[in-house]
Image (cartoon, helix red, strand yellow):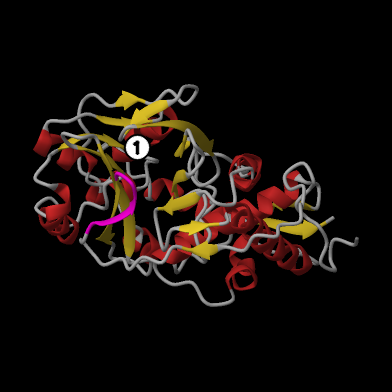
Amino acid sequence: MDAITGSRIIADRYWRREVRTGPVRFADVIISPALPISVAEGVLLVRLPLPFALDHINVYLLDEGDGWTLVDCGLDTPEAREAWDRVLTHPLLQGRPLHRIVVTHHHPDHVGLAGWLSARFGIPVAMTAGEFAVAGRYADPARDVVAERCPFWHEHGLPATLAPELLERMPRYSRQVHALPARVDGVDTSAPITLGGRHWRPVVGRGHSPEHLSLVDDEGKLVLGGDQVLPKITPNIAVWPGGDSNPLRSYFETLPAFAELSDDALLLPSHRQPLRGIATRVDEIRAHHEDRLNAVIQACGTPVTCYELLPVLFGRPMRHAELGFALGEGVAHLNFLEGEGLVVSSLGEDGRRRFVRM
């Protein structure tokens, strides 16, 4: 098929396009902020507030008998700390303390309160080596990783008049993430992990973050998915300076592990509602990205910057911090297309990179 008329942009090596018969089925549970709810035997879901358009994160407590293992922690805000104060005294926790913390990835809404809870209970924190390395770089007080993105923004077409506002409004990691303990345990992703009386198989996802940890129980019935596969929304797949230059390809390469899971497995995601029908949801996510990739390639009939393509990708104006995330995601789509030989880019004398269809 012709690439500019709605083709299969995502190659078969990333997506075999199997016919799915099972629909996505959402769990019939009512989730309220800071009120633990049982979603499986020995597993509690806790919803914590976020000060963004996506206004919550789901974290999970796994019953260890004499205490709890916590998977993800929430953002370090006064509202989230207050929510934890309510959660920790809820009758479902039976007065038992937290024993350890496992973090799926380095993003602030997942790791933000890990250091605070670790100090409060004197408990260890564990995460994959790839995620801990990025968390350490981002938390370095000697660096301003937002300011480091200014040349990247310029290269990809951000008007100079918008750069100061974006620099001011982009969130700072150190303001959202409590300092991690001096020692953080590494997660061996090649071996099963025992948590909450179950053995879990680590599944590493890439693209959204460098070594994202998801966990599948040994019976294949439960999946602690983090952000790698989400209901109704797609995780941000973006290029950041010093990171993966083709994260959308990395994301596609690690999605098959989720598409192979049982149709009856219960996905416990970090946002929105738990669901069954993971493989179908994976295909919906792939189809969404293919639709966006087709739209981008059709708009590249003449050389254009990523900034000029944002209305094509998102269908609405981007404002404030979301503009920074949108640029990262736009470049991810363009770099994927260039990697597949469908567009080519060049850097102009004005320092702007423009992409054009091959």
Relative to 65, is 258 above or below?
A: below
In the image, what residue type sits under mark 1? Ala
* Residue 29, image x, y percentages: 36, 65
What secondary structure is marked by label 1? helix
* Residue 311, image x, y percentages: 60, 73
Q: Is residue 349 visible?
A: no
Residue span colored magenta: 36-42
Nearer to me, 271 or 176: 271
Q: Which residue is mark 1?
A: 135
Residue 195 location, quadrant? top left
Left or right: residue 154 versus residue 286 is left
Left or right: residue 166 versus residue 300 is left
* Residue 192, image x, y percentages: 44, 25
Q: Residue at 12%, 50% (x, y): give it.
A: 88
* Residue 97, image x, y percentages: 13, 39
Nearer to me, 294 or 327: 294
Residue 290 location, quadrant? bottom right
Q: Is residue 316 visible?
A: yes
Left or right: residue 317 versus residue 102 is right
Q: Residues within 10 Å of mark 1 (few under 14, many from 20)?
A: many
Q: Residue at 50%, 22% (x, y): give it.
A: 190
Q: Quadrant of the C terminus?
A: bottom right
As drawn, the residue found furthest toward the right would be 1
